[in-house]
Amino acid sequence: MSVTPEAVVSILATAFSLVAFLLMLQESLALGAGQDPVSNDVRTVVRRFPRVTYALAVVIGMLLGHLLWP
């Protein structure tokens, strides 16, 4: 079995979509119950560690660029 760049991009996109869906589902359930959603905690962490967030974005961009560059 070989791992192609298209398969890696597809897995990353699927994982990102799943995480986004779960965050939206939890937020709608939390707001309905009158609680704070988890996305507020994610936002707080991203604002607390902007360099780590930027570095993660750069690494993801480098990975995708490496896999998709012909």
Image (spheres, rainbow, N blue to C red):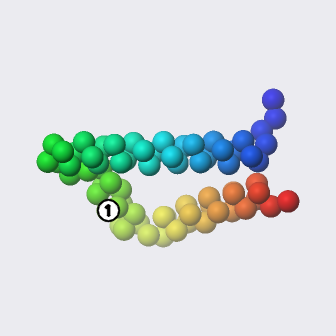
* Camera-side residue of 12 and 25: 25
* Residue position marked by numbered label 1 in the rendering: 44
Q: Quadrant of the N terminus?
A: top right
Which amino acid is tagged 1?
A: Thr
Vertical placement of 4 versus 51: above or below?
above
Percent coordinates x, y for residue 67 in the rendering = 76, 54
Q: Residue at x 81, y 35 (%)?
A: 2
Residue sitting at x 40%, y 63%: 46
Residue drawn 56% across the image and 63% down it: 57
Q: Position of residue 18 (x, y in %)?
A: 48, 42
Left-right relation of 65 to 12: right
**Number of other residues with Cα within 10 Å of mark 1, as a class: few under 14, some 14 to 19, many 20 or more:** few
Residue extending farthest to the left is 34
Residue 49 in percent (x, y) is at: 41, 66
Taking the image as shown, residue 58 lies to the left or right of residue 25, namely right
The residue drawn where x is 55% and y is 61% is: 56
The residue lying toward the viewer, choosing from 64 and 49, is 64
Q: Quadrant of the C terminus?
A: bottom right
The part of the image, by quadrant, that contains residue 4 is top right
Give the secondary structure at mark 1. helix
Of residue 55 and residue 19, the one placed in the foreground of this image is 19
Q: Is residue 19 left or right of residue 39?
A: right
Q: Is residue 40 left or right of residue 23?
A: left
Q: How many marks overall?
A: 1
Q: Where is residue 35? Give x, y as percent.
A: 17, 48
Residue lying at the far top in this picture: please name it: 1
